Image (cartoon, grey):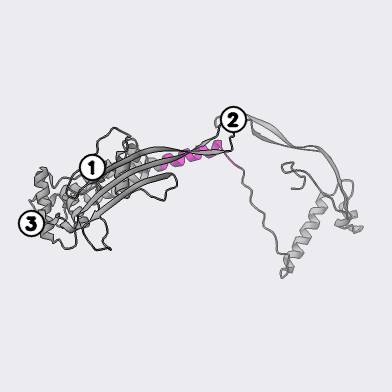
Amino acid sequence: MNSSEILRIDPKDRVSLSVRDLTVSVKNQQKSRQNDNEKSEKATKILNGISFDLQAGEMLAIVGGSGSGKTTLLNTLSQRLNQHNKKLAFAGSIDYISNNDDKEMKLRNSYMQQTDVFLPGITVYETLKYQADLRLPPTASEFEKTSLIDSLLNVLGLDHRQDDIVMSFTATMPVYVRWTKYLAYFWYAFGALTANQYTNWMGDCPYDKNSEACVQYSGKFQLDTLGFPQGWIGEPIGILVAWFIGFNLFSAIGFTFKSYDVEVAKTKSNKIGGEEDEDEKSGEESINDESAKLPDSIPTNDFAQNNINNDDINIDIHNIQLSVKVKADKSLFNFKKTDRILLDDVSAVFKANEVNAIMGPSGSVELLK
């Protein structure tokens, strides 16, 4: 079987096409002018009453201006549009006519899009070989696939370019984002590791060493494919060191001018039991603390002799004031600070053996918080 026989379709498997009054519309919801809550659907027709016949073995050209519905027609014929889409409305009929009596036969079609997609990093020959392995029937042998590829390269005049890379990895990125790789530390780290591995490196080529097929087994080929120069080791390491120092420097500057107070919870002692010595010790410390807080008018010895309990102590405060220094605004370069009053002339009496409640909304700074 020659290369042309592989693409040949048996006459009984060929399909004819009959289209009658094909209409495709897009549903648009618009608000009523009289009542804004009411919405009315208005359909915009993309295809309007298309009818034609296409016999098996014939070629049909669809000609029209931009936006005339050519792509929509092809998508509808190849069943690439979802018929259950609520935003689309379909009308008319499409009949696929075949002479094959097998009811389980599935319709197969090939659709070449306006913008083809190529895998980066592979040659022209490898691209065709990949498509041949993917699309040709399983009965096609490797020799038949190779013959078909060679025939296509000869017809298209690409036989002398079959070992060229179709598309590089960098070409897959949009032009307006290619420069962003120089802002990522991963680009320099990966580039240094890759250059260190593939500079002056040569893999095991199964062909003759002087053959052009061995070029893709060289380290230079790998670096050119990824977009890294050879011997690019010292420069990215220096950039990484500068990146590390700059990141920490800017972080220190940012925390200097934009600082936040961090509160850490106090450690609480065990009050369940099992640590009697510590409880007794803490009790002694609390008594000593209370003794130190007594006013000068009451001697500590008299206080101990009268055996006064903590329950007998009242707290009387008068005109308590508390303020903090804060920035006037949150701008980065503002160094001016103002006083913010938290407590302003607060007077209160906390009586012993009674429930003393401190009430206020959130942010009112309760006294004993």
Closer to the camera: disc 3 or disc 1?
3
Residue in view at x 26 percent, y 61 percent: 105
Left or right position of 198 against 90: left
In terms of depth relative to the viewer, which is nearer, 149 or 302? 149
Q: Mark 2 — residue?
A: 335
Q: Which residues are magenta?
A: 244-260
Q: Which residue is mark 1?
A: 229
| The one of 18 and 115 positioned closer to us in this rendering | 18
Residue 351 visible in the displayed image = yes
Q: Residues within 10 Å of mark 2 (few under 14, many from 20)?
A: few
Q: Is residue 110 visible?
A: no
Q: Secondary structure at mark 3?
A: loop
215 vs 43, left or right, is left
Does 188 sit left or right of 207 as displayed? right
* 295 vs 102, nearest the viewer: 102
The kind of residue tagged 3 is Asn
Q: Residue at x 75, y 64 (%)?
A: 279
Q: Nearer the viewer, mark 2 or mark 3?
A: 3
Of all residues, the one furthest to the bottom in this rendering is: 274
User: Which residue is denoted by mark 3 in the rendering?
Assistant: 2
| Above/below status of 284 relative to 173 | below
Asked if residue 267 lies in the magenta stretch, the reply is: no
Q: Position of residue 33 (x, y in %)?
A: 56, 31
Residue at left offset 83%, top offset 53%: 291
Do callouts 3 and 1 mark residues in contact (Cβ within 8 Å)?
no
Label 1, secondary structure: give it. Answer: loop
